[in-house]
Image (cartoon, rainbow, N blue to C red):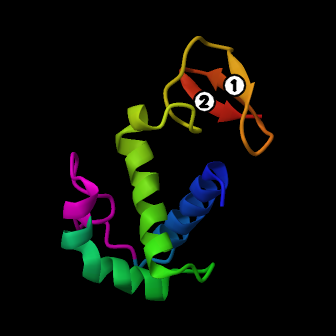
Amino acid sequence: MNRAKSLLLAGAMLAALCLSGQAQARTPCNPPRPNLEYPAWYQECEAVLQARWRDSNPYGLPYREYVRMLWQMYEVAYHPERHPGLIGSACSPEGSGYMNQSGHAQICRGGRWTVK
């Protein structure tokens, strides 16, 4: 699965989590505490992640892939500098663009990459 598709799928999964009413936004798991790295997040949240995987996995992803995609979505939100060029990450100069791997044009608008 390519990176853009993975991020879109992770976003859809997060939306399903939040809309299902089962997401535990009050825990350090959704979203993770600031500056929490993957190993610590996984260790603290394993029970929550397993429950979410069972209850909120509309695409039937394997557990490790489901967890990896959730983390990737959080990491892009908290550490966009690790993912230059991903949709939503910081960009410059304004109006610059390129064709991403999935064949969509990415354009720098408002200091963030967007897809056209």
Q: Which residue is nearer to you in this view: 109 or 85?
A: 85
Q: What residue is rendered at 80% in x and 40% in y? A: 103
- Given the image, on which type of amino acid does mark 1 rest? Ile
The residue sitting at the top extreme is: 93
- Give the residue pinned by disc 1: 107
| Quadrant in the picture for residue 16 | bottom right
Q: Which residue is nearer to you in this view: 78 or 85?
A: 85
Image location of residue 66, percent across then percent down: 48, 72
Q: What residue is rendered at 60% in x and 80% in y? A: 58
- In this rendering, the answer to whether 25 lies above or below 3 is below
Q: Is mark 1 in CB contact (under 8 Å) with mark 2?
A: yes
Within 10 Å of the Cα at label 1, are there few (<14), some (14-19), or many (20+) other Cα atoms?
Answer: many
> Which residue range is magenta in the image?
23-41
- In this rendering, the answer to whether 106 lies above or below 97 is below
Give the position of the N terminus as an image quadrant.
Answer: bottom right
- Given the image, on which type of amino acid does mark 2 rest? Trp
Q: Report how far apart the C-alphas of labels 1 and 2 lie in the structure.
A: 6 Å
Image location of residue 33, percent across then percent down: 22, 54
- Give the residue pinned by disc 2: 113
- In this rendering, the answer to whether 36 lies above or below 60 is above
Provide the secondary structure element on which disc 2 rests: strand
